[in-house]
Amino acid sequence: MSPAIFVLLAVGLGLVGWLAARQRAWAFASQGDTRLHSLPRYHAWYVALWAFVPALVFALVWNSVSPGLVLQSVLADPAASALPAFGMTRNTILAEALAVARGSAQGVFNPLAEPLIEPARAAMQRYSIIGIVVTLLIGFAAGVYAFLRIRPDFTARTRVERAIMWLLIGASLVAILTTFGIVISLLFETIRFFGMVNPIEFLFGTHWSPNPMGDPAYTKSEDYGALPLFWGTIYIGAIIAMIVAIPLGLMSAIYLTQYASSGFRKWMKPMLEILAGVPTVVYGYFAALTVAPIIRDGAHAIGISSASSESALAAGLVMGVMIIPFVSSMADDSIAAVPSAMRDGSLAMGATKAETIRKVLIPAALPGIVAGVMLAVSRAIGETMIVVMAAGAAANLSANPLESMTTVTYQIVAMLTGEGSFDHPATLSAFALGMVLFVVTLALNFIALRVVKRYREAYE
């Protein structure tokens, strides 16, 4: 049975409890000489939570346990005695029978699965009924317990607010624990990779040509030199893209905050920030179909015959355009936060508007601007789609922007989507690259936070 049915049952129990408790609380409130400690809606939410949460927890547990019970019931049937003792064939036969019994398949390929369909169907029905009945009983019992506790002096509001606080703590823990789990998995696989490949060769080697289909026993550390990937990532994301994004983003922020009329700013700022919402695949198409051919043709026109249709320059330019809203938005907010008294004071001292911007506003807004640039760099070096479509896959350690280059993120995708096993060093190299990327972006965010904290000014 679908898990959604159990969730709907829990929601239904909570709704019934909410209505009943609210009616009981209103009955207390309607008595002239009785004053409720909490509003009726808090009593209603208290009972609803008691009816909903235990029923939902049991439903989740039951949905994870019941498949195993169904499988045991099927294996206990006499028809299962004809199955192989173990192995992939046995699992395939059971999966076919369970799929037909569940209704997700029309028939079976293996004749041995046919007699297992009815036992599987009967077991699913039996355990579904048990799950529904127990869910209703748990939700009803918990709701009745909470309902009977409702009294005029019952502190329902305090208890509901405490439950919401625990809910918020749980939500924050989910994000923290998820990040922690990702880091642990990255670290574990990275250690496995460095058990096969020398870390020094990986970090400082200049030759990147892993073979996911090769024999892992003949792995050569010199084939895993990731320096060209690190250089390509920095060259495209932190140099070319930032050469485009920082000046344009900063100048657009200065214009919108200091020169544009309020009506023009009201329309232009949202339009600029729309660029941040455009899917990166659209930028990739733009880079591959428009910018890259223009750069190639322009290079050929001035005599550079080696220019190709895949280049670091095309990817970097389009990536810079994509990053402009990040820089502009942060700079705009920082400049707008500078008190107008500082600007007016500078102008009153005889400084021109340009001098005021250069010597007063920009220095005062520098922490926010630097933080925006750091976040933009983090965003750029993690970009994949534009690189895939415009920069190519060649691991070149070159300063020529017209050559094809690749980045860390592209190679991570290439290694993890190949046909190599997860025990092969070529596949594990993706985790090592991800670990390096994680450390770099973490360092950039740490630097941004330190800059903001070090130079932040509090204005009245």
Image (tube, rainbow, N blue to C red):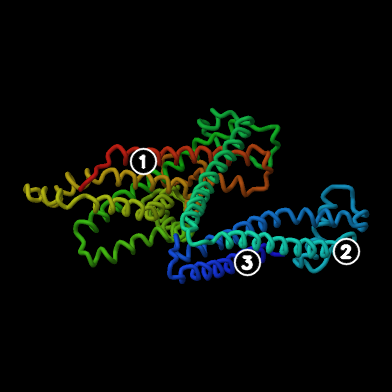
Q: Is residue 233 left or right of residue 425?
A: left
Describe the element under mark 1 as helix, strand or loop: helix
**x then y, percent, for residue 246:** 31, 48
Residue position for label 3: 8
Is any atom of residue 397 visible in this view? no
**x then y, percent, for residue 165:** 48, 51
Q: Check the image and name the residue furthest to the front.
A: 33
Specify few, some or many for label 2: CA neighbours under 10 Å numbering under 14, 14-19, or 20 or more. Answer: some
Decide which of 380, 435 is in the foreground and name it.
Answer: 435
Q: Is residue 362 left or right of residue 430?
A: left
For marks 2 and 1, the one nearer the N-term is 2
Which mark's residue is nearer the viewer, 3 or 2?
3
Q: What amino acid is labelled 3 in the image?
A: Leu
Q: What amino acid is labelled 1 in the image?
A: Leu
Query: In the image, which disc is placed on residue 449?
Result: 1
For marks 3 and 1, the one nearer the N-term is 3
What's the CA distance linking mark 2 and mark 1?
63 Å
Which mark's residue is nearer the viewer, 3 or 1?
3
Tags 3 and 1 in contact by the CB under 8 Å rule?
no
Decide which of 71, 310 is in the foreground and name it.
Answer: 71
Q: What amino acid is labelled 2 in the image?
A: Glu
Residue position for label 2: 114
Q: Quadrant of the N terminus?
A: bottom right
Tags 2 and 1 in contact by the CB under 8 Å rule?
no
